[in-house]
Amino acid sequence: MIRMKRWIMTGLMLVVMLVGTAMAIESSVPLDEETHHGHVSTGERIARVLRRAGLPDGVVVFLISALPIVELRGSIPVGHIFKMNPLTVYVLSVAGNMVPVPLILVFLGPISEFCMRFKLGRWFFEWLFARTRRKSADIEKYETLGLTVFVAIPLPVTGAWTGAMAAFLMGMSFRHAMVSIFMGVLIAGIIMTILSLMGWIGAIVAGIVLIGIAFSGMARWLKKEEAAAVDAGGQGPAA
């Protein structure tokens, strides 16, 4: 029964990832500046401002990926519009997206405790933590794997920032949180790179990649759980 519930949850997670991939297509920046009519993404607006300030394109991509909400969902399409090398864009975006993660994990606790002494600070962090808990409720059931999947889905309500706050609220160790979020950022970067370069074909490829990664990770996790249960059963009370 427990195994069936786990596989049901795995299926639901895969559905969410596929839906997230499809929604990411709708929210991604168009591939060609010349075909861009009307809609301008948040990432592109920020890129224009930073470019006018004289910053190199690589620095612009790096900074955009470090910003909340936008993250690498915005930086990778912008890098493609800049006609940068896709691998360079990917590396810069992953690196930039990871910069705030250790800072959030280490300093969110002390900063929130200090600010919650004041009425405005208490209101803000209560709202922020409540929002994070709502967006990441299912993560707690699977912790490490759940956090990776959550970060990997390239949507505005997910990502490294929210994942780091969720890890803090769940009390995950720094090492486990960093590994989980880093894996999620790597996957999200692959998805956005494929979407930017290949459109709908990329969506199909990204979906297949996600399914393979999720099933592989879940299979290893289930085997580990079963092995631990067998070991615990075999180490019963000594006669």
Image: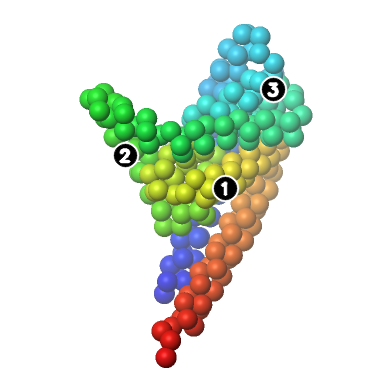
Which residue carries the number 2 mark?
A: 130
- Residue ID at (61%, 8%): 53
Q: Is 36 drawn above or below residue 19 in the view shown?
A: above
- Which residue has dot 3 on it? 58
Marks 3 and 2 in Cβ contact (< 8 Å):
no
User: What residue appears at the point 29 percent right and 34 percent down from the top-left corner?
Assistant: 126
Q: Amino acid at mark 1?
A: Val
Task: Say whether disc 3 or disc 2 marks the residue closer to the N-terminus.
Answer: 3
Q: Are marks 3 and 1 in contact (CB under 8 Å)?
A: no
Checking the image for residue 179, the label placed there is 1
Is 142 placed left or right of 83 in the picture? Answer: left
* Disc 2, SS: helix
**CA–CA distance between discs 2 and 1?**
24 Å
Q: Nearer the viewer, residue 220 or 23?
A: 220
Task: Compare residues 125 and 40 and report the one nearer the observer.
Answer: 125
The residue under label 2 is which amino acid type? Ala
Which quadrant holds the N terminus? Answer: bottom left
Query: Which amino acid type corresponds to the residue marked 3 in the rendered image?
Result: Gly
Question: Which SS class for mark 1?
Answer: helix
> How much space separates mark 3 and mark 1, taking CA atoms?
25 Å
The quarter holding residue 29 reads top right
Q: Is residue 156 visible to us here?
A: no
Task: Estimate the spatial distance between the alpha carbons at disc 3 and disc 2, rounded to whole Å.
Answer: 35 Å
Whether residue 68 is visible, yes or no, is: yes
Specify the label residue 106 is tagged with: none
- Give the residue at the far right of this rendering: 85
Few, some or many C-alpha atoms within 10 Å of disc 3 (few <14, some 14-19, many ≥20)? some
Residue furthest left in the image: 119
Task: Name the mark nearer the viewer: 3 or 1.
Answer: 1
Residue 82 point in image, percent of width and height? 71, 21
